[in-house]
Structure formats: structure tokens, C-alpha cells
Image (spheres, rainbow, N blue to C red):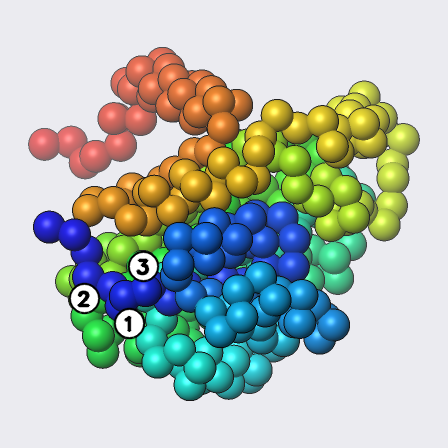
Amino acid sequence: MTRQTTNPAVWLITGVSSGFGRSLAEAVLTRGDKVVGTVRNETQIASFENLAPGRAHGLLLDVTDAAAVPRAVGQALERTGAIDILVNNAGYGLFGALEEVSDAQARQLFDTNVFGTVNVIRAVLPHFRARKRGHIVNFSSVAGVIGIAGCSFYCASKHAVEGLSESLAQELHPFGIGVTLVEPGGFRTNFAGGSLKWSENELPDYSETVGQMRRYMSSYHGTQAGDPAKAAEAIVRAVSADAPPLRLPLGPDAVDVVRKKLASIQDNLETWLEVSSSTNFDQ
């Protein structure tokens, strides 16, 4: 049985000015659906709405503004009458060793990548629960699957989104609301370009570890194998399925990362099985 949505479906996508958000919005609009897309700059609204006049609706929103998010969701509902699919795409990367990243930088990252996602979900959930349907797509990353030297806080933020989403899926299942985690590998977006932020400090002691990441990223932007348009098509296909996946790795590199992580966990479990299983009271 096909999952019930309005016809055409209404998508609320955060961060549609560029990258995955823009590609996904374009894919959704091409199939005739409606999109309410959030941007950070008012000058970006017109260009977004011109993609599909009457079906593309731009909203100015900073997802870290907890008071503004419910108002924006209310405006989205006024314009479209319903929301079927919420996509939490807004976020950015922060690279640097844990010692190099300031508290202010780390907190700002979590305010956007984690609590920004939470703000939007909380604002949309009453609408989803009242309708007993809806789907939430949360953007994670391969950095939500593994730890990577040189981006510890970014990995931590995406691991948080992973745990949040997995728990949320169980909480919302009785209401007919689904959750999908998108875990992209390397895609040719602006993530490694203007969107990427670096630590305020650079310690020489990390030159052979984090320093390698700095040197690598300087030539990485624009060379990624992943096509954002194909990623958007994959997301639409997954969300439109009768049984959408909880996790959707995107790209052969992401699939490889997940396979290696699963093998590593299994190997670690078997190696330490006796110790791990020895902690109950004696019978």
C-alpha cells in the first residue's frame, strides 16, 4: 500500500540556497510537488520561488532561533495547508582537532547541526501527530558513522543526529510517522568550500594527523565523485517507498565506510566477548 500524503506532496526543506537542499528541492519540484524552503538571506527567496512559481515558497529562517522556528512552520502551513515531509538539511562542517576548536565554535556547531534540527522537528511534530502521518529526513554524514581525525566535533554532532533519529523513529512509529537518516559520502556541494569552517587555532603537534586533513581538504573541494542531483533522486525514491529505510548511505564511498564500520564492530565484539560477557553477578 502506498503511504498517504497530500497530492501533490508538500516538503519543508531547510537550507535550500545551495548544496543538497537546493538539489533536493529542484528534484521535488520537477516531479510536481510543493516545497517550502528556508534560506538565511532574504535576497535568496525570489530566486528560489522562481524555480516553480506557486509551488516553491521561500522562508527566511535561522534554525538556531528557537522562537522563530514555530512561526516559520506556521507560515509554511498557512501557505500550503499541510506538510508531508520534513527535511532537516541545514548545517555545516567544522574541522580541527578537539584541542584546537574553541568552546564558542563547538557550541555554535551543535546549536545548528543538532539543536537546529531539534527545533524544527519539535515545531512540525504536532502537525504530523494530528494527521497520524508524515516523514522526517535528517541529514547525517559518513561522519555520523565513523570518527575522523581532524573533525571530532563535526563527527560528534552527526553522531548525535544519528542517535536522536534512531530513538525518534521508535517514538514516532505508533503515530505513523517515519524517520530516515541520510548519510552522504563525498558530494560536489559547497560543504568543503565556503560552507566549511576551521578551528581558530592550529597546533604544530597535530601536523601529522589533523594537518593532513587540512592539506587534503584544500584540494578536495570540486573533485568529489558524488553528484548532488543523483543524491536527491535517491532520497526521493527512498522517502516515496512503501517502507522507507531508517538509514540511507549515499555514494559508493559511504557504503564502503558503513561496511568497514560494521566489520570493525563485529571484530571488536568477538575479540573482547569473554571480558564483555563477564560482568553479571555470579549465580
Provide the residue designation for mark 1: 128
N-terminal-most mark, 1 or 2: 1
Residue 92, how many percent across, how many down?
66, 52
Residue in the foreground of this view, choosing between 207 and 230: 230
The residues bearing labels 1 and 3 have C-alpha atoms spaced at a distance of: 8 Å
N-terminal-most mark, 1 or 3: 1
> Label 1 is placed on what type of residue?
Phe
Residue 132, how many percent across, how many down?
19, 70
37 shown above or below 178: below
Which is closer to the viewer, label 1 or label 2? 1
Left or right of 183 on screen, residue 242: left
Provide the residue designation for mark 3: 135
Provide the residue designation for mark 2: 175
Characterize the local packing of mark 3: few (<14), some (14-19) or many (20 or more) Cα atoms within 10 angstroms.
many
The residues bearing labels 1 and 2 have C-alpha atoms spaced at a distance of: 8 Å
Residue in the foreground of this view, choosing between 144 and 246: 246
Quadrant in which the C terminus appears: top left
3 shown above or below 41: above
Q: Are marks 3 and 2 in contact (CB under 8 Å)?
A: no
Which is closer to the viewer, label 3 or label 2? 3
